[in-house]
Amino acid sequence: MRAPKTFRLHIGIFGRRNVGKSSILNALTQQNVSIVSEIAGTTTDPVEKPMELLPLGPVLFIDTAGIDDIGNLGGKRVAKTLAVFDRTDLGVIVTNFSDWGEYELQLMETFKEREIPFIIVFNKADVFPENIEITSQLDSIKVKHVSTSATVEMGISDLRQLLLNTAPSDFINRPSILADLVGPGEAAILVVPIDKEAPKGRLILPQVQSIRDLLDNDSFCVVVKERELREALSRFNKPPKLIVTDSQAFLKVTADTPPEIPLTSFSILFARFQGDLSEMVRGAMAIDTLKTGDKVLIAEACSHHPIGEDIGTVKIPRWLTQYVGGKLEIDNIRGHDFPENISEYKLIIHCGACMWNRRTMLSRIMKARQAKVPLTNYGLTIAYSLGIFERALQPFPAALEVFKSEN
């Protein structure tokens, strides 16, 4: 089974048209992933290629359209390219010594502003000789660079090594989902309702990832449906360290869980794992400021077709409406598309983003903060609107303190 995107280092490849971005990607992956042509602008949309980049592990390369594309259609391609910054963990600027100039300097500045590590690839080195002045300037500001020729596979092994050396440490030392809350030799109970939205024969990704995280940490794991929790607890001669539930079963699981046992939801765990839990706690507290007619944006990372009582389109709008006591104007979006202007919204509610990398979620949090729009996620919204917010934050002392100090 392939590693999901959330666990892959996202490597974005940027540069002008016809500098060899697609050729570099093909050489790195040793596959014809992207179409290569002498015609400028051949790559029109971002092309994704998952692979194993040993010894780093699973990565996702994203080949983009030329940043200097022109015309109305070119402008749309550039907009899609710029959106890739939001999900890039490691940037690659492809150029050559002949083309080096303002475009590349702008790309460097963007990476620096976003605090994204990046490298420079001077491609076509067999055609354009090294410019000592340019490389000396880069060395003086400690910008990593390498010379390659994708067509004759010159310098590709050096490029792979440079990617490994530049990978952000927080990817290599990725935090756990919940194992740190349980500990080796201790047990957690995962409450997993089986309903229409549960894939037949499978568990959803956050549940699978949580189980694996516990096993990797030498912790015990018991998986039950919500109506079996009491029976499961009665069989423990030592209380579990943590109970995690699907947010939709929060009320029943809370009622069946003794107050001394920490309780939270998968979605809240992912608010910490994929985003900024304290910031999202503040966002959930903004629910109290909502009033009839306010605009709320509900964002779903997956582009699945809603089934029955869908959480994002049916249940959360219903619970929010009941909490506010009046009708809200709710917009739903899916996938990587995100409104340019979010200032019209009083609140943004996001899914757990289990299918994305963490940088994508942090980019959305940053945009919301810049627009002064509170942002939270599904699990926190459900816990807040159902009146069990403090209970759900019990395993997270820092986030609980944010709630208590700002409440």
Image (cartoon, rainbow, N blue to C red):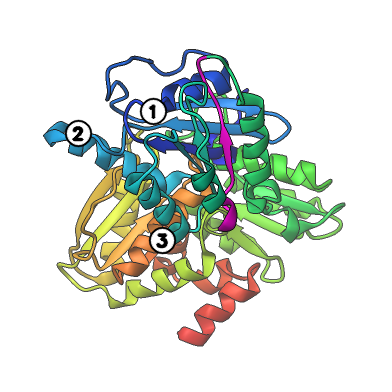
Q: Point out the tag, 3 or 1, that comes first from the N-terminus.
A: 1
| Residue type marked 2 | Gly
Q: Nearer the viewer, mark 2 or mark 1?
A: 1
**Residue 89 appears anywhere in the view:** no
Q: Secondary structure at mark 2?
A: helix
**SS at mark 3 in the image:** helix
Mark 1 secondary-structure assignment:
loop
Residue plotted at (77% across, 54% down) = 234
Would you name the residue on which mark 3 appears?
365
Residue type pointed to by label 3? Ile
Pinpoint residue 101: horizontal percent, then vertical percent: 36, 45
Residue of label 2: 74
Amino acid identity at mark 1: Val
Q: Quarter of the image containing the C terminus?
A: bottom left
User: Of circles 3 and 1, which is in front?
Assistant: 1
Q: For residue 208, say whether it is visible.
A: yes
Q: Which residues are magenta?
A: 139-151
Q: Who comes first in sequence, dot 2 or dot 1? A: 1
Label ID, residue 213: none
Asked if 75 appears above or below 299 in the picture, the reply is above
- Give the numbered dot on residue 19: 1
Quarter the N terminus occupies: top right
Around disc 1, counting alpha carbons within 10 Å, would you say few (fewer than 14), some (14 to 19), or many (20 or more)? Answer: many
Q: CA distance from mark 3 to mark 1?
A: 33 Å
Magenta-colored stretch includes residue 227:
no
Instruction: Give the residue displayed 66% in from the left and 31% down from the top.
Output: 158
